[in-house]
Structure formats: structure tokens, C-alpha cells
């Protein structure tokens, strides 16, 4: 029997093949995401003494190559911190979301993920990682877009993100230090948030900021909070706490001289 060629059948075959390929691609992508989620570590492209290629990094690069913008945005909310972090960095790189909207996802999240870059082991929260990734992009990879800036020349997005960190219910210790080292004026609302970290939580960075900028109006609360912090730090013996303890003692001494 001779089979005749039917254009309609060929079209159906093509549609079926495309569907099968899409299904396989989707399954492969989900397998890669599952692999990253099970490892649940953040790794740079090269890790270890020999600088071997990270399989976790390689897996997400494959995910990113197959994912749509919507896929990447959705993955920023993945239960795995590793998947969420990789996706967030991809979102920043591709400018797929307003930066403030992305940071709002993590500003109340204090979970820490292990990270490996070269020979270094770095533990961080997602918001710490994407904060510095965004600063790097603003400085070195601005792209074609011009970012709105404040009167001081700082990108408006950074001003808003810094405010989010100050008003968070989670104490992002490292980022509070970064934010409060900047020589800039804060809104009244932001200053009240800094005072909350200083006097309710005895955050060393907030206490230093109030001491340097609003000492005269807050001497009594400063001295009280610094003495509470000193007592806490005297109970823990390590080099970082010893440095902070010196700073705390110096501020207390200066306050006591003015009494």
C-alpha cells in the first residue's frame, strides 16, 4: 500500500513534537530547580582551591537560559533560599522588577544561607546578597537606563531600600552598619526608626549614629542603652565583640565626662 503525503497530518505531527519538546524542557527545568533546592547553598561560578566549576551555579545558568522573565520573578518566592537568591540576582541583572519591590520580599526575612566563592565561605541573608549586587550594578553596569537620583546624587531606589532596612522588624545587623555609615540626612521617620534600634535593641551601629548626630538630646537614653550593651558584650569573648566593647566604653566615658 502506498501512503499519500497529507499536509494536515504533517502539521499535527509538528504540533505534537513541539509539545513533547516543551514538556521535556519543562521537566528538565524542574529537575534542575529541584537539584538546586536540595543543595540549598549559594555558589559562585568557581569554587574550591582548584577553582572548579560549581554544579549548582551551572544548574541555575541552565534554568535561566530556559526561563521567561515571569518564571524568574516567580522563582524569587521559592521556598529554597538558594533558588530564591539565584533568581533574585537574575532579576536584578535583567532589571525585571522595580528594586524596591524585590527588596520588600526579603526585608522581613532573617534566614541565612551558606555561600561559597572560590575558597571563601560566606553566610548571608538574601537581602544582603542582592543589596550589594544592586549597588554593583548601579556603579559598574548601569545599562541604558538612567536612574532617578536625590538632591545628594544618590539613586532614589537606594534611599527607599535603606529606609526599608531601617524600618524592618528584622535586625539586619550588617546592613544597618552599611546604611548608617553613609553621610546623609534621614527623614524624621527614619531617625525615629534608628532610635528604636538604638534604645530598644541596643544596636551598636544605631547607637553610634545617635551618639555622633543627636547626642545632646538623647544623652540619658544613650548612656543607659550603652551600659546594657556593655554588659551583654562582656559576657561574650571574641575579637569582634572586644572591638565593639572598646567603642562602647569610649562612648560611655565621653558621656560621663559631660555629666
Image: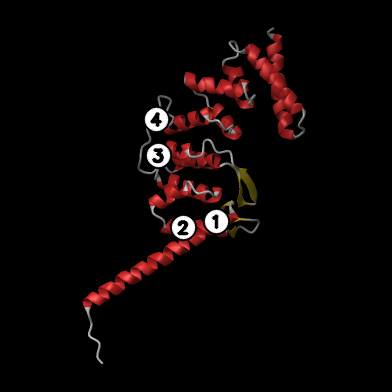
At 68% across and 15% down in the image, what residue appears?
Answer: 223
- Residue at the spot of label 3: 98
At 48% across and 18% down in the image, what residue appears?
Answer: 188
At 25% across and 76% down in the image, what residue appears?
Answer: 9
At 52% across and 20% down in the image, what residue appears?
Answer: 191
> Which of the two residues, 223 or 29, is positioned nearer the viewer here?
29
Residue 50 coordinates in the image, percent (x, y): 64, 59
- Residue at the spot of label 2: 63
- Outermost residue on the front side: it is 1
> Which of the two residues, 100 or 142, is positioned nearer the viewer here?
100
Label 1 to label 4: alpha-carbon separation: 37 Å
Q: Which of marks 2 and 4 is in front?
A: 2
Asked if disc 2 and disc 1 are in contact, CB closer than 8 Å, the reply is yes
* Mark carried by residue 149: 4
Q: Is mark 1 on a helix, strand or loop?
A: helix
> Which of the two residues, 180 or 161, is positioned nearer the viewer here?
161
Q: In this view, does 154 lie to the left or right of 116?
A: left
> Which of the two residues, 199 or 245, is positioned nearer the viewer here?
199
Mark 4 Cα-neighbour bin, 10 Å: few <14, some 14–19, many ≥20:
few
Label 2 to label 1: alpha-carbon separation: 10 Å
Label 4 to label 3: alpha-carbon separation: 15 Å
Nearest to N terminus: mark 2 or mark 1:
1
Nearest to N terminus: mark 1 or mark 4:
1
- Residue at the spot of label 1: 36
Nearest to N terminus: mark 1 or mark 3:
1
Nearest to N terminus: mark 2 or mark 4:
2
Nearest to N terminus: mark 4 or mark 3:
3
Q: Nearer the viewer, mark 1 or mark 3?
A: 1
Q: Is mark 4 on a helix, strand or loop?
A: loop
Residue 12 coordinates in the image, percent (x, y): 28, 72
Residue 157 coordinates in the image, percent (x, y): 43, 33
Mark 1 Cα-neighbour bin, 10 Å: few <14, some 14–19, many ≥20:
many
Amino acid at each position: 500500500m502506498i501512503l499519500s503525503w497529507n499536509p494536515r497530518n504533517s502539521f499535527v505531527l509538528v504540533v505534537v513534537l513541539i509539545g513533547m519538546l516543551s514538556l521535556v524542557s519543562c521537566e528538565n527545568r524542574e529537575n534542575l530547580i529541584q537539584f538546586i533546592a536540595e543543595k540549598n547553598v549559594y555558589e559562585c561560578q568557581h569554587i574550591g582551591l582548584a577553582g572548579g566549576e560549581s554544579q549548582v551555579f551551572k544548574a541555575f545558568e541552565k534554568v535561566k537560559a530556559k526561563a521567561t522573565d515571569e518564571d524568574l520573578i516567580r522563582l524569587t518566592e521559592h521556598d529554597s533560599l538558594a533558588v530564591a537568591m539565584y533568581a533574585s540576582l537574575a532579576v536584578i541583572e535583567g532589571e525585571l522588577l522595580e528594586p524596591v519591590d524585590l527588596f520588600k520580599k526579603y526585608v522581613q526575612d532573617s534566614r541565612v544561607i551558606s555561600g561559597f566563592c572560590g575558597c571563601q565561605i560566606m553566610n548571608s541573608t538574601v537581602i544582603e546578597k542582592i543589596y550589594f549586587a544592586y549597588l554593583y550594578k548601579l556603579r559598574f553596569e548601569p545599562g541604558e537606563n538612567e536612574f532617578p537620583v536625590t538632591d545628594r546624587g544618590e539613586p532614589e531606589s537606594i534611599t527607599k531600600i535603606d529606609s526599608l532596612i531601617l524600618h524592618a522588624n528584622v535586625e539586619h545587623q550588617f546592613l544597618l552598619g552599611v546604611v548608617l555609615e553613609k553621610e546623609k540626612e534621614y527623614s524624621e521617620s527614619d531617625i525615629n526608626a534608628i532610635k528604636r534600634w538604638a534604645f530598644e535593641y541596643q544596636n551598636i551601629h544605631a547607637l553610634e549614629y545617635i551618639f555622633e548626630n543627636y547626642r545632646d538630646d538623647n544623652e540619658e537614653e544613650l548612656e543607659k542603652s550603652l551600659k546594657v550593651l556593655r554588659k551583654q558584650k562582656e559576657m561574650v569573648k571574641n575579637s569582634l565583640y572586644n572591638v565593639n566593647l572598646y567603642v562602647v566604653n569610649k562612648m560611655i566615658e565621653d558621656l560621663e565626662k559631660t555629666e
